[in-house]
Image: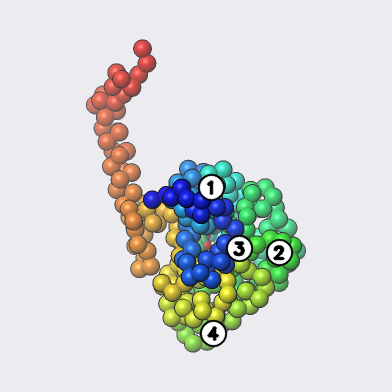
């Protein structure tokens, strides 16, 4: 239940997340792409709302996140900001917006923050993005890192697969995590890596880790809101727990409406105006 205590209402900042880790409190993060979901998620007391480039898949219907542009992220983040009052709103930097050069990354991150109202940005990768992360954090932009399965590299990785299973690959992810912290990241998403590796990285780092498909030993967890709500009955990955079956509920409601329109039950006289 949403609590109305002062503590619950306090605006979340990147500093709060660090303090939560120090107190051993778990951070809750969810994605949102519009004002209505953002308002409901915010009201439920979630600390971080991520305007993920997952919107390319769940909102736009693409097979990957690659087609998402800076303009799409600005549009959706501005909508989310109108709905969220307390949560920290983080905007994903889409594919191609930070890989060209650190200057280009800074330019795009600054544009996203100015035009959408985002309070932080997130980008994917380890060693290859360190310079971009440094450039942004030195300019006052809070940056969340993302290692393990990095969906923007899906074609290079050969699919959406678990990462870091072999010792060398695991070591690389651990080194990347430490280097991202060193470069100034305030938090790190760990996606689809073995639970033990996620636990080790979490205890190595002073900044909070947010896991997805990385087990229970992270400092927080993130899910795509459509996945948590069971909006796609075809999507059943092992890491996911569906808290609702909205695919069935929504289809059922729409079928009821369609039947009532066809047989004349809706609208009834009381739904009209004298
Ligand atoms: O784009 C996204 O939604 C994400 C989360 C799943 C971490 O990157």
Q: Nearer the viewer, residue 66 or 15?
A: 15
Of labels 2 and 1, the one closer to you = 1
On the picture, is 191 further left or further right than 106? left
Of labels 1 and 3, the one closer to you = 3
Q: Which residue is drawn at 55% across and 64% down?
A: 17
Give the distance between the C-alpha atoms of the residues marked 2 and 3, in whole angstroms: 17 Å
Q: Residue at x 53, y 47 (%)?
A: 84
SS label for mark 2:
helix
Q: Do the residues labelled 4 and 1 touch (CB within 8 Å)?
A: no
Query: Label 2, on which residue?
Result: 136
Disc nearer the start of the sequence (2/1): 1
Q: Whole-percent x and y of residue 66?
A: 56, 60
Q: Can residue 138 be seen in this view?
A: yes
Give the residue furthest to the front.
Answer: 6
Q: Residue at x 47, y 66 (%)?
A: 25
On the picture, is 170 further left or further right than 101? left
Q: CB of residue at label 4: within 8 Å of ligand 1?
A: no
* Tag shown at residue 129: none
Q: Can residue 58 be seen in this view?
A: no
Q: Whole-percent x and y of residue 130?
A: 67, 73
Disc nearer the start of the sequence (2/3): 3
Query: Label 4, on which residue?
Result: 171
Few, some or many residues within 10 Å of mark 1 (<14, 14–19, 20+): many
Of labels 2 and 3, the one closer to you = 3
Q: Do the residues labelled 1 and 3 touch (CB within 8 Å)?
A: no
Residue 212: which quarter of the image? bottom left
């Amino acid at each position: 239940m949403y609590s109305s205590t002062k503590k619950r209402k306090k605006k979340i900042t990147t500093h709060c997340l660090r303090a939560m880790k120090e107190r051993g409190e778990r951070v809750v993060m969810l994605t949102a792409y519009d004002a209505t979901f953002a308002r409901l998620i915010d009201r439920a007391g979630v600390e971080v709302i991520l305007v993920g480039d997952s919107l390319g898949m769940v909102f736009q219907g693409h097979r990957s996140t690659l087609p998402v542009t800076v303009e799409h992220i600005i549009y959706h983040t501005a909508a989310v900001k109108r709905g969220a009052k307390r949560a920290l709103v983080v905007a994903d930097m889409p594919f191609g917006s930070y890989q060209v050069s650190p200057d280009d990354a800074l330019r795009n991150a600054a544009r996203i923050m100015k035009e959408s109202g985002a309070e932080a940005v997130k980008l994917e990768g380890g060693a290859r993005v360190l310079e971009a992360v440094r450039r942004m954090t030195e300019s006052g932009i809070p940056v969340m890192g993302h290692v393990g399965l990095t969906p923007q590299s899906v074609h290079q990785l050969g699919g959406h697969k678990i990462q870091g299973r072999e010792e060398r690959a695991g070591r690389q992810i651990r080194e990347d995590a430490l280097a991202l912290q060193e470069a100034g990241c305030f938090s790190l998403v760990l996606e689809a890596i073995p639970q033990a590796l996620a636990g080790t990285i979490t205890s190595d780092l002073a900044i909070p880790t947010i896991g997805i498909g990385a087990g229970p030993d992270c400092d927080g967890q993130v899910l795509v809101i459509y996945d948590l709500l069971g909006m796609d009955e075809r999507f059943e990955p092992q890491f996911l727990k569906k808290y609702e079956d909205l695919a069935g509920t929504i289809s059922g409601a729409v079928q009821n409406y369609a039947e009532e329109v066809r047989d004349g039950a809706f609208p009834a006289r009381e739904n009209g105006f004298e």
